[in-house]
Amino acid sequence: MKIYRKYAAISVGLALATALAVVLLPGRPVNAGEAPKKTAAELEKEKAMKNPYPNDIGPEKLDEATLKDYPADKKAGYELAMVKCAQCHSSARPLNSRFVEPEGKDAAVSALKKSNPELFKDGAVWQIEGSVWNRYVKRMMSKPGCKISNAEGKKIWEFFVYDGSKRKIGANAQKWQAHRKKLLADFKAKYPQRYEELAKDKDL
């Protein structure tokens, strides 16, 4: 009987020690009713939602009709972007962005300025630069809580470069222009003060 009581006491002691260890683990709230701390990515997403852009009120994914003709590696980059970009903001933000980075970089931009000067008249519809997506993806990768490896970042960047040339210029330029102008009009109606702030900074 004494041996049984001894082992029972040891078991109870171990159970209490385990419970205390779980409660006092770093990063866990001591009080059961206390909300867990938000991750860096969650805080970034909250910040993004408080500072919306016209892009944010557009579609959060591409339709199948658009994607069906994309190469397999670009589709993979798209799927990756939908998961990784959504860590810190809506996937609508990059998908509806005015950014265009032509394949061929600065030389391609110079060629477009000669062949299609209308694409450079409205910076709220098209922002065409030789490294704009490269710069944007790298900036996103450096944000707190962003879990994107270099290899993943490269695939995401390659997708946005390809997608921009397919959906925003060339044969689809007018369709894209109509899409962006509607986003801008809807955004202005929904967030008039924010619209004026962004327009002043030329950051629509």
Image: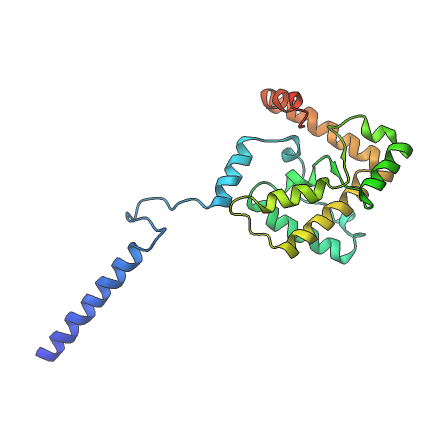
Classify 198 as above or below 41: above
Residue reaching furthest right?
A: 115
Name which residue lies at 46% across and 46% down: 39
Between residue 117 and residue 104, name the one nearer to us.
104
Q: Is residue 165 left or right of residue 194?
A: right
Name which residue lies at 64% across and 48% down: 82
The image quarter containing residue 112 is: top right
Quadrant containing the N terminus in the rendered view: bottom left
x and y percent of residue 2 in the render?
8, 78
x and y percent of residue 67 in the render?
76, 50
Name which residue lies at 86% across and 39% down: 170
Classify 126 as above or below 26: above
**Image colouring:** rainbow
Exactly how many numbered labels are in the figure? 0
Residue reaching furthest left?
A: 2
Between residue 78 and residue 119, name the one nearer to us.
119
Quadrant containing the C terminus in the rendered view: top right
Q: Is residue 113 left or right of residue 160?
A: right
Name which residue lies at 73% across and 50% down: 158
Classify 128 as above or below 159: above
x and y percent of residue 56 in the render?
63, 35
Residue reaching furthest front?
A: 106
The image quarter containing residue 116 is: top right
x and y percent of residue 91 in the render?
63, 43
